[in-house]
Image (cartoon, rainbow, N blue to C red):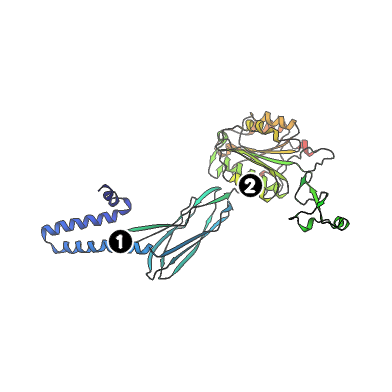
Amino acid sequence: MRRVLRYLFARQRRTLTLLILILLGAIFVAVGTGFWLLFRIAYILALGIPIAIVISLLNTRGLRVTVDRRTTRAQAGQEADELIEVQNTSVIPKLWVEVEDPSELPSHRSRRVVVIPGRGLRSWVVRTELRRRGLFGWGPLRVRSGDPFGIFQAERSYGARQQILVYPRVVDLPNFQTPPASLPGEGRFRRRTHYITPNASGIREYAPGDPLSRIHWGSTAHTGELMVKTFELDPTSDIWVIADLEERVSAGSGDESTEEYTVTVAASIARHYIAANRTVGLISFGEQYDLVEAERGQQQLSRILESLAVAKAKGEAPLGNLLLEEQRRFGRHTTLVIVTASTDDLWLSALQSLSQRGVRVAVVLIDPSTFGGSESPLLIFGELTASNILTYVVGQGDDLSLALSTTAVGADAWQG
């Protein structure tokens, strides 16, 4: 009995509840008074409610629904596409069918009501602007229908739940500069690599999978065996980007927060150097510690963007502690780029220690005072420039391409 009452008095079934109350009231009064109009009302409701049930059930039967979510990875600012098809396999027209693909994506709107003739097909493409980075769920597809009077609704789910990864935004940094690392010998160091570079180091026997462009034809003719060239890395330093995601130093909210600016700057710097065929690594400590070992190439950029896509400023480790823990990774062949909104000088001593060891350092300060924070970066900026550490300052609303292209005070030591 309780289940029946819960069903009848649920919010989405108020119309049904009202009609049943009217039916029971009409029967009770009609039997007591014999008034013919109340008998007619009772007859109509007694027949109409079952008919409405049948119509609502038929409207969701005989449907073949498919959804093709074409986008699984994309950049913030791009669009995600999905193709939805609803086919009526029966001869009975579907007069009112509501189709919705629920999603956690901001600005996602896919609800549509369609009329499908017998043996008919309806299809459409839903485009959603990707406004926010992160990992979002999609689906399953929901199909609802009911009777013309809105008394009953039937719902079915189609397909499976999927996910879409939205990479952070990146901006072009045509004039961004960092100090070059100290390289041994005549300013050059070399490492073996499977990439083709201008630095050929020798030859070896051909192995299955080697491209024909690497064959050394002179040695092949001399030895009678296929020989291929081996290469070394260009004489450039490793670039390490550290994204400071400590919760204590974050300010602002949503897209206008130090968290989003930190992620965007870190992603843009990584893309800038990978596009120049440099070796780039990433370290961040948000909700969890995340390390992407230094490599080069487009796959490395994808790994870095994947890491930053889900990064949150929820970290508990101060930047100074992170630098001390990871200092073993940074040598004289390393250029370190730190992106932080921290205004205290507790991490400055660790940075100065690395600089004294020969690690080249650049800092991008995200000004928290422009995001509603109470701290100003003026003091730490002065200490950094006094230590001859190349420093950029980024505030809310700044054009990042411009803010990260002006050489800051402290660059004279390495420019000379």
Q: Could you classify mark 1 by the number of other residues whose Cα lies within 10 Å: few (under 14), some (14-19), or many (20 or more)?
A: some
Tag 1: residue type?
Ile
**328 left or right of 6?**
right
Q: Nearer the viewer, residue 329 or 275?
A: 329
Q: Which image quadrant: the C terminus?
A: top right
Question: Residue at the front extreme?
Answer: 224
Which secondary structure lies at badge 2?
A: helix
The alpha-carbon separation of the residues under discs 1 and 2 comes to 53 Å
Q: Earlier in the sequence, mark 1 or mark 2?
A: 1
- Whether residue 263 is situated above or below residue 112 in the rendered picture: above
Tag 2: residue type?
Arg
**11 left or right of 82?**
left
Which image quadrant for residue 265? top right
Q: Position of residue 370 (x, y in %)?
A: 58, 39
Q: Position of residue 290 (x, y in %)?
A: 61, 39
Write down the residue under mark 1.
53
Q: Position of residue 300 (x, y in %)?
A: 67, 47
